[in-house]
Image (tube, rainbow, N blue to C red):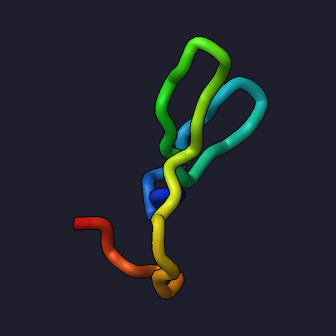
Amino acid sequence: MVIVNFPPKQIGPFTSECLVTGFYREDGVVLVSPDKPVPNGAKLG
């Protein structure tokens, strides 16, 4: 799941305009994802 339309932010040599969401675990990061299909651009509420 990605949040877009953020103002550009410099992260190292890259410019980012989105935020990828996830949860930390001891063995790595688990990316957030819906459990059922949703249309692109659907609002998270």
Farthest residue, direction front: 35
In the image, residue 32 above or below residue 22: below
Residue 34 relative to residue 10: left or right: left
Farthest residue, direction top: 26
Q: How many marks?
A: 0
List x then y, in percent, for residue 7: 45, 52
Farthest residue, direction left: 45
List x then y, in percent, for residue 8: 53, 49
In the image, residue 29 above or below residue 40: above
In the image, residue 13 above or below residue 38: above
Seen from the viewer's position, the closer of residues 30 and 43 is: 30
Q: Residue drawn at (54%, 20%), measured in percent from left and top?
A: 25
List x then y, in percent, for residue 30: 58, 37
Q: Residue drawn at (77%, 29%), measured in percent from left and top?
A: 13
Farthest residue, direction right: 13
Q: Residue drawn at (49%, 87%), measured in percent from left and top?
A: 39
Residue 31 relative to residue 7: left or right: right
Seen from the viewer's position, the closer of residues 17 and 42 is: 42
Q: Residue drawn at (57%, 44%), measured in percent from left and top?
A: 31
In which quadrant is the C terminus drawn?
A: bottom left
In the image, residue 26 above or below residue 33: above
Seen from the viewer's position, the closer of residues 18 and 43 is: 43
